[in-house]
Amino acid sequence: MRRILAAALCFCSLAVYSVTALAIEAGVRGEYWFPTISGSAQTTTNGLPDTPFNLKDTLGVQDEDFPFWEAFLGVSRFTFRVGYMQPQYDGSSTLTQTFVFNGQPFAVNEKISTRLEMDIMDGQLQIDILRPSIGIAGFNLGLILQGKYVDGSIQVKSASTGVSTSQDFRLGAPMVGAAAGIGFLKDMFRVDARATGIAYSGSHAYEVDAYASFTPFPFVRLQGGYRYFDLEVDESDVQVSLKLSGPYAGLQLSY
């Protein structure tokens, strides 16, 4: 019995030591983003290009604020993240020229309404290559491998005739990038930045996220920063170019 108890004690001690050595951390991050949107698009019908248009000037799309979410699990030098956001935009305008979208013509002086929406999902692995500590400060520099999927649609509807047409666009791509950060007083104060991107076959996706954070209470971290997202989708029936950039604020709960 003494041997069994001794073995159990050794096993428990080893398990506690292993968890501590691995420095496991898990949590969720919720932010509210206040971006400015800009961009343009053009559809193609039967191999012929329709009217090119600007989202704001032609369709009257307005800036909108929305949340984004992220869950993470950190194990030693590895951090796994999954993220999701759902931007939705509405617009209205009176056309100053004939406008053809997805093969459907809209006449001069016709009032139209627009709906742009996207589902954006991310999976990310960060591998810290350097993690030195100097006095009260700690640094990290790492490599990021990311998968991004964008599922979007643009709908245009005539306010006078009720005629409506929509066009979908999608992008699924691997991305690579880097992460860097510095923390003070055992990470009570931190500044972090992440940048990833990919470009291929006329399409691209670039993303930058830089933020500062502070831990006022255990398990709670207040954050604020700036996020930039540049997306271009080049498909056979649609070309879409979008840029979203602006500040955000929120918090992180972790253990």
Image (spheres, grey):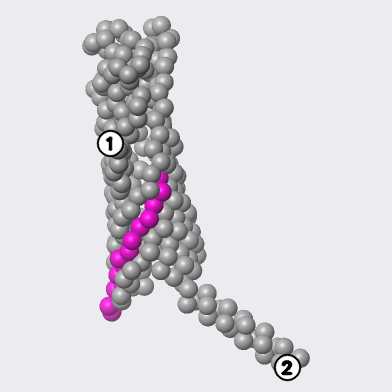
Q: What element carries label 2?
A: helix
Asked if residue 37 lies left or right of residue 252, the reply is left
Q: Identify which amino acid the numbered label 2 is placed on.
A: Arg
Residue 202 marker: 1
Q: What kind of residue is marked 1?
A: Gly
Mark 2 or 1 closer to N-term?
Answer: 2
Q: Magenta span has 143?
A: yes
Q: Which region is colored magenta?
A: 134-148
Disc 2/disc 1 C-alpha distance (Å): 70 Å
Disc 1 crowd rating (10 Å Cα; few below 14, some 14-19, many 20+) is: few
Query: Does residue 36 appear left or right of residue 215 in this picture?
Result: left
- 174 to 254, vertically: above or below: above
Quarter of the N terminus within the rendering: bottom right
Residue 242 painted magenta: no
Name the residue: 31% across, 46% down: 198
Which one is nearer the viewer's eye here, 249 or 118? 118
Residue 37 in percent (x, y) is at 29, 34
Is residue 124 found left or right of 199 in the rendered image? right
Picture disc at residue 160: none
Q: State the count of labels.
A: 2
Disc number for residue 2? 2
Spot occupied by residue 126 in the image (x, y as percentages of width and height): 38, 60
Q: Is the magenta stretch mostly helix, strand or loop?
A: strand
Mark 2 crowd level (few <14, some 14–19, many ≥20, 10 Å Cα): few
Query: Which quarter of the picture shows residue 161?
Result: top left
Question: Depth-wise, is mark 2 or mark 1 nearer the camera?
Answer: 1
State whether residue 68 appears in this view.
no
Residue at 67 percent across and 90 percent down: it is 6
- Indicate whether 216 appears above or below 248: below
Q: Residue at x 25, y 21 (%)?
A: 52
Residue 247: x and y in percent read 29, 46
Q: Is mark 1 on a helix, strand or loop?
A: loop
